[in-house]
Amino acid sequence: VTPAGTELADVEVRDGSPTGPVLTTVRLKATGDATTYQDFTAPLDFEGSKRLYLVFKQLAGGPVIPFIGWGNLNWVSFSGPGTKEG
């Protein structure tokens, strides 16, 4: 188990493809328990429709953890003007 608060990885939200421009980045941190979930937020500002890609990146100098060890991604949601929820 990775200690709570350990920075694990960055998730880049990219425009149009996995190699497209980075729109925002979310830093993932360990919760210390596989059954403890945490919310992460980041600003995302654009107009119109876009195809977004989530790209998971190991941190430079960070822990080397196989993807399976990073935890559980339960869901991704968007809110604000222009979304069904906003």
Image (cartoon, rainbow, N blue to C red):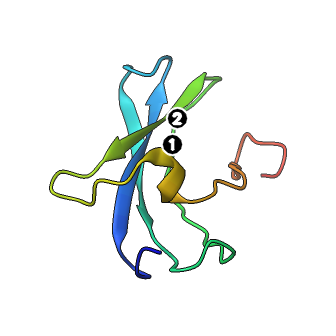
| Three-letter amino acid code at the position of disc 2 | Phe
Residue at 71% across / 50% down in the picture? 77
The quarter of the displayed image where residue 57 is located? top left
Residue at 47% across / 25% down in the picture? 15
The quarter of the displayed image where residue 3 is located? bottom left
Q: Do the residues labelled 1 and 2 touch (CB within 8 Å)?
A: yes
Residue, disc 1? 45
x, y (%) of residue 10? 37, 51
Residue 60's label in the rendered image is none
Which residue is most to the right? 84
Residue 46's label in the rendered image is 2
Q: Is mark 1 on a helix, strand or loop?
A: loop
Going by the image, does 80 lie left or right of 50?
Answer: right
Which residue is most to the left? 61
Residue at 44% across / 22% down in the picture? 18
x, y (%) of residue 58? 31, 47
Relative vertical location of residue 3 with respect to residue 63 in this rendering, above or below: below
Q: Which of 20 and 67 is in front in this view?
A: 67
Mark 1–mark 2 Cα distance, whole angstroms, equals 4 Å
Q: What element carries label 2?
A: loop
Crowdedness near tag 2: few (<14), some (14–19) or many (≥20) residues, C-alpha within 10 Å: few
Relative vertical location of residue 7 with respect to residue 65 in this rendering, above or below: below
| Three-letter amino acid code at the position of disc 1 | Asp
Residue at 57% across / 30% down in the picture? 47
Q: Can residue 42 be seen in this view?
A: no
x, y (%) of residue 39? 61, 69
Q: Which of 4 and 13 is in front in this view?
A: 4
Q: Is residue 22 visible?
A: yes
Count up the numbered dots.
2
Q: Which of 47 and 12 is in front in this view?
A: 12
The quarter of the displayed image where residue 12 is located? top left
